[in-house]
Image (cartoon, rainbow, N blue to C red):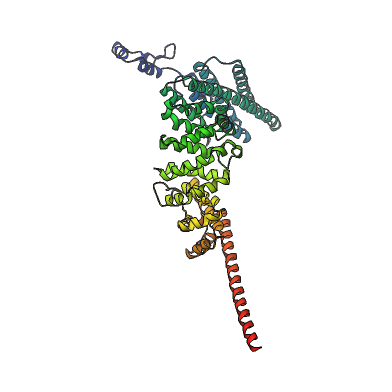
Amino acid sequence: MMALPGGRHLDSIPIPGQRLHLMQVDSVQRWMEDLKLMTECECMCVLQAKPISLEEDAQGDLILAGGPGPGDPLQLLLKRGWVISTELRRIGQKLAQDRWARVHSMSVRLTCHARSMVSEYSAVSRSSSQEMGQIEKLLMEKCSELSAVTERCLQVENEHVLKSMKACVSETLSTLGQHFGQLLELALTREVQALVRKIDASDNIYTMETTTGNLFSLTQEGAPLCRIIAKEGGVVALFKVCRQDSFRCLYPQALRTLASICCVEEGVHQLEKVDGVLCLADILTDDSHSEATRAEAAAVVAQVTSPHLPFTQHLSSFLESMEEIVTALIKLCQEASSGEVFLLASAALANITFFDTMACEMLLQLNAIRVLLEACSDKQRVDTPYTRDQIVTILANMSVLEQCASDIVQENGVELIMGMLSEKPRSGTPAEVAACERVQQKAAVTLARLSRDPDVAREAVRLSCMSRLIELCRSPSERNSSDAVLVACLSLLLFFFFLSVIFFLSFFSFLFFLFWHIMGVQILRFQ
C-alpha cells in the first residue's frame, strides 16, 4: 500500500463510481467516511508512550471511550477531568511502589490528556480569560517537568539519588494536581454561569428543560460542583422557575435539581435567602400540582431537614411554615399512589421529627400513627426496608410522648413494630442490609420507649416479644450481624427484666401487706 502526503493511502482514493455515491450523501456522512482515513495525533502519542509489557496492570490503562459530542464543553471537561484525576492518583500509587518505568509512561500519557483537554476546551468554549490562560500555561509546564524528571529517574541507579528525586517528583505531582484542580474549577464555573444565565434569560420551555437537565447532571458529579452551582446563583434561578406557572411541567425537574444542590451548606443558605421554604410549602399545600411535583418538593424538604447535615439545624425560616408542611406531607403519605412517593414524604416527616420536637405533637394531632400503620399493610406504598426505616424512625421519635402509646395499642401497632424486628434484606446489597439493621434497631428502641406504658408492655409479652429478642441476641444472622441491633435488643430485654422484678416485688409487697393485715386482725381478736 503506497502512502501519500497527509496520511492518506493510494488504496483509499475513491474511483469515480464511489465518488458519485459519496456526493449523494450528506456532509456528516462524508465526514464520517473521511474520518476513518485520518491519523489521530493524540492516539499516536498514547501508543508511543504505552509500554509493551507483561505487567499485571498494563491492561488497566485508561482510554477515553466515545469522546464528548461536538460543542459540548461540559461533557468534555467532566470526561477529561475524570481521566486526568484518575491518572494522577495512579501515578501516585506507582510512585509509592518505586515503579519508575510505569511512572514515566503514565506521566507522558497524562501530558497528552492535559494537552488534549486544554486544546479541545479552547476550541469549543468562549474566549478564555487571562487567569485561565495563566493556569493552563502553568499546568503544561508542570506536565513537561514531570515527564522530564521521571525520564531522568529511569537512568539513575543510585538509591540515595533516587530517593531525593522521588521527593522532587512527588512535589511536582502535587503542584500539577493543584493547577489542574484550579483550571477545572474555573472552566466548570464558567459553564455553570452560562447555564444559569440561560435559565434566567430564556422563556422557551424546551431550552429551559434542556438547561435544567444539564444542571441536574452536574449535581450528580459530587459536592464540589453543587457548591459551584449554589455560589453562581443556581438555587435562585431554579426557584424562579418554580414560581412561574408557565413552567409548571418543569417543576419536578427543577425541584429534583434543588434537592441535589442542597446537600451542601451553600445551597441551603441560598434557599433560605430566596424564601425557598415558603415556596416549597406553597407547592406542597396546592392540590392543583401533580403528585410528582409535590413528591419532589417533599424530597427538597427531606434534604434541608436532614439530621446528618449540621448546617440544616439553623434553618430558622422552616419553623414558620412547619405546620403547613407537616399537614401536607401526611396528606401526601395517605394519598400516595406509589412506594417512591410515600418514601419521599415519609423521609421528610422523619427528618422533621429530628428537626423540631413540636413536629411530634403536630403529627399526633393529625393522626399520623394511624396513617403510617395503615400504610404498613399496603404493599403498593410500603414495600422496601428503606420505607419501613422512615416509618419506624417517626414512631421512635413520637414514642417520647405519653399519648403515643395508647394510640399505637389502639391501632395494633405493637404487633407491626415487633414484625420489624424480623426485617430481612431481599437482595443482600450493603445498602439494603444497612437499612434492615436500622429498622431492627429502631424497632427495639421504639418498643423500649413505649413499654413504659403497662398496656404496651403486656401486649409485647403476649406477642412473645421476649423470645424474639433472645433469638436476636443469640443468632447474629437474625440481626444481620449488627452490634447496634444486639445492644438495642439487650437494652430492651434488660428493661423487661426490670419490669418483671418490679412487678414481682410489687406483688410480694401486696401479699406481705395482705398477710400482715390478716394477722393483725387475728391478733386483735385474740386480745
Q: Nearer the viewer, residue 156 or 483?
A: 483
Please, is residue 115 above or below residue 327 in the view?
Answer: above
Q: Compared with residue 213, is residue 452 higher up or lower down, i.e. above or below?
A: below
Residue furthest left in the image: 17
Q: Position of residue 388 (x, y in %)?
A: 47, 49
Residue at the spot 57% in from the left edge and 60% down from the top edge: 452
Residue 416 in the image, given as x and y percentages of width and height: 46, 56
Q: Which residue is situated farthest in the bottom direction here?
A: 526
**Is residue 46 something one can see in this rendering?**
yes
**Towards the viewer: 449 or 1:** 449
Of 264 and 324, which appears nearest the observer?
Answer: 324
**Considering only vertical position in the picture, is 439 above or below 200?**
below
User: How many numbered circles are shown?
Assistant: 0
Residue placed at 58% from the left, 56% from the top? 487
Q: Where's residue 150, x and y in %?
A: 62, 26
**Quadrant in the picture for residue 66:** top left
For the point 47% across and 21% down, the residue is: 72
Left or right: where does residue 44 sit relative to residue 317? Answer: left
Task: Choose between 81 and 328: the one closer to the eye.
Answer: 328
The answer to whether residue 58 is seen in the rendering is no
**Which quadrant of the figure contains the N terminus?**
top left
Quadrant position of the C terminus in the picture: bottom right
* Residue 17 image offset from top left, x and y in percent: 28, 12
